[in-house]
Amino acid sequence: MNLICNVHYGVKFNNAFWDGEQITLGDGDSARFASFAKSLDVIAHELGHGIVENTAKLVYKGQSGALNEHFADVFGTVITQLAENQTADTADWLIGDEIMGPDLYGEALRSMSEPGTAYDNSILGKDPQPAHVKDMYTGTEDQGGVHINSGIMNKAFYLTAIEIGTDEAALIWYNALQNLWPTANFKEAVGEIVRAARILAKNKRVDKNATQRVRTAFREVGLF
């Protein structure tokens, strides 16, 4: 996969995106958002969409779309933690906190450790991400909640990483991603992640208790 990144896109463009071939980053309007190129986790998140597109090709709607967003967030935080020499315990687990402009200072786009708490203001409203499947969004906005329901899976990844470390959790998730398919839902993804943990633990590539840690994490968010 070629790595192409466009910066200074448009005029005061408040977004970043993967278009199927390359990453594009706006400069922000300097009020709500600063330059999206300032945030490594945002850049890595968009790159993550490219990885998903070249592996599982998760359809961008409903639960498969939320998985697409989730895996992109996983890549975002893993790359940031590696670059910043952080651990699961020392990382802030925020996505996009560096791009929040003066009007939104101190907030972030998403919190992987505490979904639903990244922001609460008069401009964006309150962060709608759920941390448990019982609160899953079932409406039609946001392509069926792709950015919203990703919080459930994000929480499970965070809980796993706290127990076995971000590197080992990432290895499990990446191996599972390669065995997913375009229309996979949450339950199917959980099955593949647990299976990946079991195989990697058996081969002594991750903690021997990794499978149980993964199951416990998904149980806490209502997916096991």
Image (tube, rainbow, N blue to C red):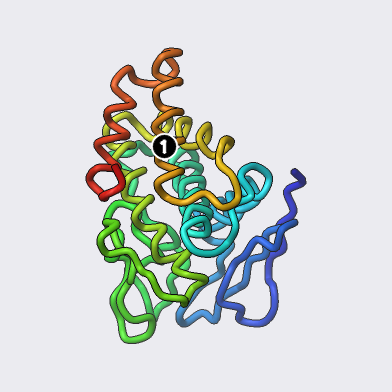
Which corner quadrant of the image does residue 1 belong to?
top right
Say if 200 sits above or below 187 in the image. above
Report which residue position mark 1 lands on.
191
Labels in figure, total:
1
Residue visible at 53% across and 31% down in the picture: 175
Which corner quadrant of the image does residue 193 belong to?
top left
Q: Position of residue 202 (x, y in %)?
A: 41, 14
Type of residue at label 1?
Gly
Q: Residues within 10 Å of mark 1 (few under 14, many from 20)?
A: some
**Foreground: 135 or 175?**
135
Say if 185 sits above or below 13 in the image. above
Q: Position of residue 20 (x, y in %)?
A: 71, 58
Q: Position of residue 104 (x, y in %)?
A: 37, 76
**Foreground: 41 or 164?**
164
The kind of secondary structure element at disc 1 is helix
Which corner quadrant of the image does residue 91 belong to?
top left
The outermost residue toward the bottom is 122
Query: In the picture provided, is 13 more to the left or to the right than 165?
Result: right
The outermost residue toward the top is 203
Residue visible at 69% across and 78% down in the picture: 10
Residue visible at 28% across and 31% down in the picture: 213
**Foreground: 60 or 127?**
60
Query: In the picture provided, is 61 more to the left or to the right than 113?
Result: right
Residue visible at 45% across and 65% down in the picture: 147
Query: In the picture provided, is 198 more to the left or to the right than 164?
Result: right
